[in-house]
Image (cartoon, rainbow, N blue to C red):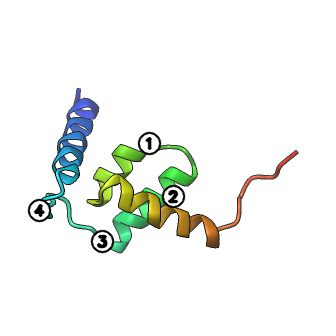
């Protein structure tokens, strides 16, 4: 139940961020963005939840995540 409430909070914040009014309920900090990038990199969070986590729109997060991918090597060995 607590996990669902946590996800509802992120989803509601995501909906607010997508409206583009500039009033985000979650402050965008380097720490939040780093957590979101690492969660996307390791596939532990999906894009809408990651965007809500760091207070960005999906488009903004896509742009920053592409930059993250440019400068971070894959950490898994390809067989």
**As drawn, is 77 to the left or to the right of 54?**
right
Of tags 4 and 1, the one toward the viewer is: 4
Tell me the distance, in whole angstroms, between the alpha carbons under discs 3 and 4: 15 Å
Asked if marks 3 and 2 touch (Cβ < 8 Å), the reply is no
Q: N-terminal of the two: label 4 or label 2?
A: 4
Asked if marks 3 and 4 touch (Cβ < 8 Å), the reply is no
**Residue depicted at x 15% and y 49%:** 16
**Residue depicted at x 55% and y 67%:** 68
Tell me the distance, in whole angstroms, between the alpha carbons under discs 4 and 1: 22 Å
Secondary structure under tag 1 reads: loop
Q: In which quarter of the image is the C terminus?
A: top right
Of tags 1 and 2, the one toward the viewer is: 1
Instruction: Write down the residue under mark 3.
Output: 29
Instruction: Write down the residue under mark 2.
Output: 38
Secondary structure under tag 4 reads: loop
Q: N-terminal of the two: label 1 or label 3?
A: 3
Instruction: Write down the residue under mark 4.
Output: 23
Asked if marks 1 and 3 touch (Cβ < 8 Å), the reply is no
Instruction: Write down the residue under mark 1.
Output: 46
């Amino acid at each position: 139940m607590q996990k669902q409430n946590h996800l509802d909070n992120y989803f509601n914040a995501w909906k607010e961020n997508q409206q583009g009014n500039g009033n985000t309920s979650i402050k965008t900090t380097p720490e939040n963005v780093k957590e979101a990038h690492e969660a996307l990199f390791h596939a532990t969070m999906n894009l809408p939840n990651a965007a809500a986590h760091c207070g960005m729109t999906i488009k903004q997060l896509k742009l920053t995540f592409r930059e993250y991918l440019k400068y971070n090597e894959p950490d898994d060995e390809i067989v």
